[in-house]
Image (cartoon, rainbow, N blue to C red):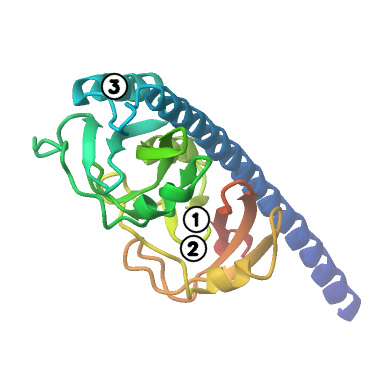
Amino acid sequence: VVPMLVLGGAEGRERYDTERRQVNEENLHAARVVANEVESSMEHVRHAVQQLARTLASGVTPDGALPSPHYLEGELDALVTYSPEVLSAYVGSPEGKALAFSPRNDLGGHALRGADFSDRSYVRQVRDATEPLVSDMMAGRGGVQGAMVVVLAPIRRDERYAGYVVAAMDLPRLRQHSRAQVAGTQQRIRVLDARGGVVFDSDIPDSANPVRSIIGTSLARELEQGGSGGTGSYTAESDAVTMVRVGALSYFGRVDVPSLGWRVVVEQPGARLQ
C-alpha cells in the first residue's frame, strides 16, 4: 500500500507541475501580446504628438504666440482622426489653459476650449521636456471619464516655450484588445503604471473604469520580488469592484514595457489546479 501511495503522490505532483507550467506559459504569452500592443500604440502616439508639436512650433510668432484656435482645431482634428490610438487631444498655453480641443465639447455638450488644466502636474513637467512625456494614470477630465493616460510634447521655437500638445490614449481600445486575447478563458489582464496605478483591468466593464491602484496589496508585494518574464502566485484581498473573495489564490505572469516602466500582469485563478 505504501509504495502505491508514494507512486500516486509522485504522479499527482508531476501532473500538478505540468499544469502549473502550462498556466505560466499561457499567462506570459498573453502578457507579451498585450505589452507589445501597449508599446506599439504608445510609440505611434508619441510620434504623432511630437510631429504636431513641431508643426505648430513653425507657426509661432516672434513674440511667442501660437496660430489661431481655428487652425489649431484643424490640426488636432487630423491627429484624432488619423490616430486610432488617440481618444482626444488639446493644445495648451504655457499656463495650462486649453487653447483648442478635439473634439470641441465634452459628453455633456459643454465647450472644452478655455478649460483650465493648470493643476495637472504634467503642465509643469512639460516646460523642461525635450521629448514627449507619458503621464501616470490619473482621473479623467476634458471629455474623458474614468482613468486616463496622456502623451504630451512641448511647443518651442528658438528655445521660446509657447505651450504644449496633449493626446489622451484610447484606453478602451487597448482594453478591448486585451479582452480579445483572453476571450473564453479565466485569465485577467491588468496593465500597471510605474507607480502601481491600474491603467486598465480586463475584469472591469468599460462603463466603470475607476482610478485604482495595487499599492499595498499582496500582488504588489509579489511583483517587487521579480522582473519581466517572471511568474508567481498571490492570495487576493477582498475586492469590492470585482467581487474577488478573500483568500483566493491566483497564478500570474508578468511582462514589462521598459520604455514606460509599466507592467502587464496576466493571472488565472488557482482553483484551476485544484
Q: Position of residue 34 (x, y in %)?
A: 56, 40
Look at 84% across and 68% down and name the residue there: 10
Give the residue type at disc 1.
Asp
- Left or right of 167? Residue 17 is right
Q: Residue furthest bottom?
A: 2
Residue under circle 1? 193
Q: Is residue 183 visible?
A: no
SS state under label 3: helix
Q: Could you tell me which quadrant the C terminus lies in?
A: bottom right
Look at 9% across and 39% down and name the residue there: 108
SS state under label 2: loop
* Residue 11 falls in image quadrant: bottom right
CB contact under 8 Å: marks 2 and 1? yes
Residue in the foreground of this view, choosing between 252 and 79 = 79
SS state under label 1: loop
Establish if 274 lies above or below 48: below
Task: Indicate which disc, 2 or 3, sits on the residue closer to the N terminus.
Answer: 3
Residue under circle 3? 77
Give the residue type at disc 2.
Gly
Task: Indicate which disc, 3 or 1, sits on the residue closer to the N terminus.
Answer: 3
Q: Position of residue 218 (x, y in %)?
A: 53, 74
Q: Residue furthest front?
A: 62
| Count of marks placed on residues | 3
State the separation of the CA atoms marked 3 and 1. Answer: 28 Å
Establish if 220 lies above or below 101: below
Label 2 neighbour load within 10 Å: few <14, some 14-19, many 20+: some
State the separation of the CA atoms marked 2 and 1. Answer: 5 Å
Image disc number at residue 213: none
Residue under circle 2? 196
Give the residue type at disc 3.
Asp
Q: Could you tell me which quadrant the N terminus lies in?
A: bottom right
Q: Residue furthest right?
A: 3
